[in-house]
Image: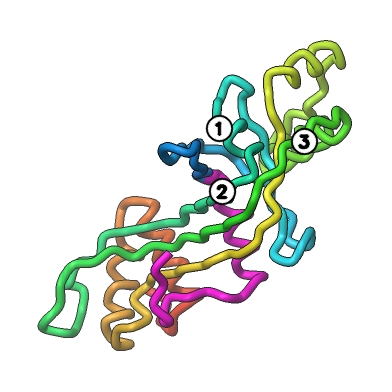
Amino acid sequence: MYIPPAFRVEDTTKIAAFIQQHSFATLISHDGTAPFASHLPMLFHPDAGSHGTLVSHMARDNPQWQHLASGGEALCIFHGPHSYISPSWYQAELAVPTWNYAAVHAYGVPTVFSDHERIVKLLGETISTYEEALEQPWPGDLPDEFRDKLIQGIVAFEIPVARIEGKFKLGQNRSAADIQGVYDALSRAEDADSRAVARLMFTECNVDESP
């Protein structure tokens, strides 16, 4: 990923928090002829391995698991909020439109695993991760026979992360007045993505909170 120095994120704690907040990833592999992508929730274990480990599963009918088992490198893209940026929000007179966004790319060689108890643990962790914020979390209690039949239809895998790239493109290369103007405009926007970019700018850039 192309990352100008002003937009590069190297804080591992910040990257881990970003992945966990935006955990529905695009997984890209190569079948030897062309790229192939799936969209999957990913669990991130930041303390497993030098750069953390991603764990997930996919349908057995999805041919991508065979690419993952071939030993080639895969790319996981975690997408954060993004928004169009109008030059009318800048103090600078000469400017052009752009786009602000945040993303993390994680690279590694996947390993498919079939240990039953490990898959059961993965599914339990996945359920608890996404249910815990709900008012009435589903406990995930299923009869073993029913659960095990479903397990036959999936393939579990892990990706020890070999390298990871974080990019928060929030206008850090512009003047303080321009950054503030963008933040103010996005804070007042009606769409949730624009307001999410504004919140990220509030934590990453030196801006004054909008009234």
Considering the image in quadrants, where does the N terminus appear?
bottom left
Q: How crowded is mark 3: few (under 14 residues within 10 Å), some or many (20 or more)?
A: some
Q: Where are the magenta residues, as a range?
A: 1-25
* Residue 171 horizontal/vertical position (percent): 34, 76
Q: Which amino acid does label 2 sit on?
A: Ala
- Determine whether, in the image, residue 26 is placed left or right of residue 188: right
Instruction: Give the residue at x 41% y 72%.
Output: 3
Q: In this view, does 33 lie above or below 81?
A: above
The residue that label 3 is drawn on is: 113
Q: How far apart are marks 3 and 1 (CA)?
A: 14 Å
Q: Which of 185 and 31 is in front in this view?
A: 31
Whichever of labels 3 and 2 marks the residue nearer the N terminus, that label is 2
The C terminus appears in which quarter of the rendering? bottom left
Quarter-of-image position of residue 132: top right
Question: x, y percentage for residue 45?
Answer: 74, 55
Q: Is 59 within the magenta?
A: no
The residue carrying mark 1 is: 64
**What residue did someone put label 2 on?**
74
Residue furthest to the front: 32
Q: Which residue is drawn at 11% across and 83% down?
A: 93
Q: Is 199 positioned to the left or the right of 154 in the image?
A: left
* Residue 12 magenta-highlighted: yes
Rendered image coloring scheme: rainbow
Q: What element carries label 1?
A: helix
| Mark 3 and mark 2: Cα distance apart in space | 16 Å
Which residue shows up at 61% across the image and 64% down it?
Answer: 163
